[in-house]
Amino acid sequence: MTDEFVDRSLEEVRFWSRIMKEHSLFLKLGFNCDDTKLINEADRFYNIFEDIENRALAFTSDTDPQQIYDFNQVVSNAVSHIWAFKRHVLGLIIQCKILGNNFPLLVDHVSREAAYFRKRLKQLNTGTLDPLPDAVINENVFFLRIMADHAKFINHLLDPSERKLVEQARDFSHDFDQLLFQAQDLDSMRPQSQTQPLLDQFVDQNRVSVRQLRDFKKTAHDLIEACRIKSIIPPLLADHVFREASHFLEILDSFEIALTSSK
Ligand SMILES: [Fe+2]
Ligand SMILES: [Fe+2]
């Protein structure tokens, strides 16, 4: 275990623990006010991930790698629990056992993000991060779907009278569905598809669209915060999806650098 292990672990845990904390809040806001057990459970997860986030922020690059290894285990355990909670909630909604404002796709989406976080922690602790050509495809297949979902959520949570913005969100949804299909095609053509020119082009093309979507989310966030548009999107949710797009863009930028330097 090296310093890089510590830095990468802290980077992942700081980013995703805040995301998990906010998911707890979004789920809570979407529950019916009579579902107090679920609301309390969501509150409990909020506190757990707030605590994890604070601990991750307190560690530094100089922290003993063994301590980070143990911390990652604790975090992974908490992530497994919130994942199970999200899947449980999904079941309740789909079987019409609870009413509320959480879309099933949103609950599935946040559970996929938890599963991703848990997988990342496992890879860090076992030293089995994907080699570059696999990482390029795997990360894109995961995040392009996340981005396509975000566009769909924005589309459905904007007031229908915001016709121009709704139209833009729908266009992004379509654009990212297409990019996702392309990524899945490249995935099924593995390993033959993992040539330098194809991966280069794949990353370049996705970066252009993710940058546009990130800017759209930023604009939406600013408009919502300034109360200039009609929607039922909390400003924190707009910021949350903006941060996830920025995170994906950082991953794409790092792929671009790695692919260029391996030429
Ligand atoms: Fe999220
Ligand atoms: Fe998301």
Image (spheres, helix red, strand yellow):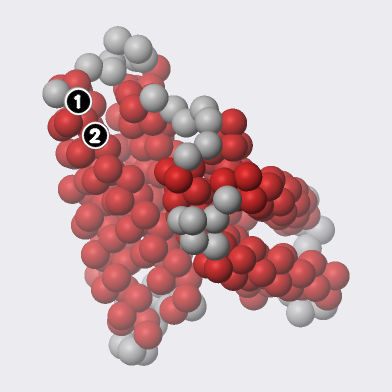
Give how far across and how far down residue 162 sits, in percent. Answer: 32, 75
Residue marked by disc 2 = 258
Asked whether, in this view, residue 85 is left or right of residue 52, the answer is right
Residue at x-position 21% and y-position 57%: 212
The residue at the far top in this view is: 192
Query: Label 1 is placed on what type of residue?
Result: Ser
Q: Nearer the viewer, residue 6 or 39?
A: 6
Q: Is residue 239 visible?
A: yes
Query: Label 2 is placed on what type of residue?
Result: Ala
Rendered image quadrant of residue 43: bottom right
Quarter of the picture holding the C terminus = top left
Element on which disc 2 rests: helix
Q: Check the image and report above or below for 232 versus 63.
A: below
Q: Check the image and report above or below for 177 versus 25.
A: above
Give how far across and how far down residue 13 sits, in percent. Answer: 54, 55
Residue marked by disc 1 = 262
The residue at the far bottom in this view is: 227
User: Alpha carbon of mark 1 to alpha carbon of mark 2: how far?
Assistant: 6 Å
Q: Check the image and report above or below for 30 versus 9.
A: below
